[in-house]
Image: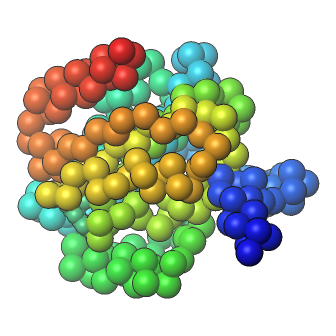
Amino acid sequence: MLTAVLMLFLAACGASKPAEQKETEKESQTQQTETETEHMPTEAASGNGTLVVYFSRTGEQYTVGVIDKGNTAIVAEMIAKETGADLFEILPEEDYYPYTYDELTDVARQEQNENARPAYQGPVPDLSKYDTVFIGAPVWWGDWPMIMYTFFENEDLSGKTLIPFSTHEGSGLSGFDQKLSAACPDSEVLDGLAIRGNDAQNDQDGVRSDVNEWLAGLND
Ligand SMILES: Cc1cc2nc3c(=O)[nH]c(=O)nc-3n(C[C@H](O)[C@H](O)[C@H](O)COP(=O)(O)O)c2cc1C
């Protein structure tokens, strides 16, 4: 029993893998994606130790039609701008996610049922440079998209302050904070922010003001 609990604990936030194995995986990710640089972080350009990591989809989305910038991407960029943080977008290594909303919901449901861990593209920024990481994603079927769990488990987020945010169409934060705490028990998780996807597209002044109010509250 104790061994099982210990294994579960070690599986969180990348702590289960020996450094050597993680390094080899990172190297091979780097080789595979040397030409895919458009989503690379601005290499700690801010130098303020804060990173915004997010996952977001374009294409057909609920209530907003076809969008060319994802709802979560809009909020992530706002947070980065307001805090001076660097940005890192989680992109699937193999982008099999459908463009149409109904088909996307089926694929997402299947991933959830299978407890899948979809791979994402590297290179991931050097996380040792960041002590605060905002982490955002759309709510998918009441939960983080499964690719986010891949990130929580692959990367070493221990000892960092993690701040979740979601975009959604009714479910709010959907337990993102508790689920993040459970996946990363060795990190501090602060109060999250939930923004309607439709507002991210159509009421950006309102969203900016919510973001700023939330950010100010985090410093209290
Ligand atoms: C696969 C899928 C599942 C979703 N499940 C939920 C949900 O459970 N609750 C909710 O409020 N919204 C849900 N939505 C709506 C998205 O959370 C919302 O449109 C979000 O803003 C999309 O963000 P994005 O453009 O960054 O991907 C779902 C959307 C998709 C595509």
Q: Position of residue 3 (x, y in %)?
A: 79, 70
User: Image height check: is 55 above or below 83?
Assistant: below
Q: Position of residue 149 (x, y in %)?
A: 53, 61
Q: Position of residue 140 (x, y in %)?
A: 31, 66
Quarter the C terminus occupies: top left
Quadrant where ligand 1 appears: bottom left
Whether residue 44 is visible here, answered yes or no, is: yes
User: How many tags in the picture?
Assistant: 0
Tell which residue pokes out farthest to the front in this image: 1
Report the residue at 57% width, 71% height from top: 117
Report the residue at 74% width, 59% height from top: 10
Q: Quadrant of residue 12?
A: bottom right
User: Image height check: is 115 above or below 39?
Assistant: below
Report the residue at 22% width, 73% height from top: 101
Between residues 5 and 27, which one lies in front from this camera angle?
5
Report the residue at 51% width, 78% height from top: 115
Q: Position of residue 130 (x, y in %)?
A: 62, 28
Q: Quadrant of residue 16?
A: bottom right
Answer with left or right where residue 102 lies relative to residue 206: right
Whether residue 68 is visible here, answered yes or no, is: no
Quarter the N terminus occupies: bottom right
Tell which residue pokes out farthest to the right in this image: 20
Between residues 66 and 134, which one lies in front from this camera angle?
134
Answer with left or right where residue 175 lies relative to residue 67: right
